[in-house]
Image (tube, rainbow, N blue to C red):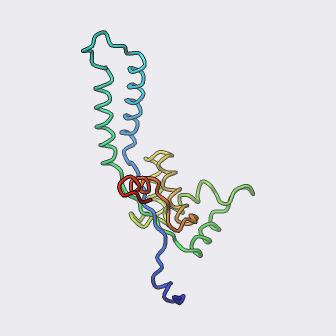
Amino acid sequence: MASIDDILKRAKPRERTVMVCVRGDLAGEAERLADELARVSEDWEPDSIAAEHPGRKIAVRLKELQKEMREHEEPFRLRYIGDRAYSDLLAAHPADNDNEAFNSETFPRALIAAACADPVMTPEQVEALFEVINEGEIKKLFDAAWDVHHSTEAVPFSLAASALLAGLTGES
């Protein structure tokens, strides 16, 4: 059995990387096109066998836009900051009422600033980022920062990987 010193030498803090789309304008355009595609598809009926669906051009543009959005996703790597630092951070952002564990306005920003290993960000830079990304992207960052501090899964399960391996090799 390994000694605690050997274990500590091998130990590394938990990390998680999330992709954040920094071009909200593209996301908005993709939503508009998806709505337009649904609308023209709902009303369209071909008038001949050679008729081209009016949504085809919209679908092609939507696919191009989705590719462009992926090109504007930036990786954010978040890392566990340690028990003492996390406890201190929680204490520095007390809840406004007894029903919450922390101040829901200030703590997420502080946790993201503290946990983001790449890119490294100051609280002011997190605030500036929050001014241009939407609540969904903010939630993605906070969820990742929260997960590296609270997740109990030692080895996360991947249904996609399991299904792929089962289909290719018969393993799961």
Q: Position of residue 61 (x, y in %)?
A: 29, 32
Taking the spot 59% from the left edge, 76% from the top edge, the residue there is: 84
Q: Position of residue 53 (x, y in %)?
A: 31, 20
Taking the spot 42% from the left edge, 27% from the top edge, the residue there is: 35
Q: Residue furthest front?
A: 170
Q: Residue furthest left?
A: 50
Q: Residue furthest right?
A: 98
Q: Position of residue 131 (x, y in %)?
A: 46, 48
- In-front residue for pair 10/141: 10
- In-front residue for pair 1/4: 1
Q: Is residue 157 above or below residue 89?
A: above
- In-front residue for pair 4/149: 4
| 88 on left or right of 2 | right
Q: Quadrant of residue 150?
A: bottom right
Taking the spot 48% from the left edge, 79% from the top edge, the residue there is: 11
Q: Position of residue 55 (x, y in %)?
A: 33, 23
Q: Quadrant of the C terminus?
A: bottom left
Q: Is residue 38 above or below residue 28?
A: above
Q: Is residue 23 above or below residue 101?
A: above
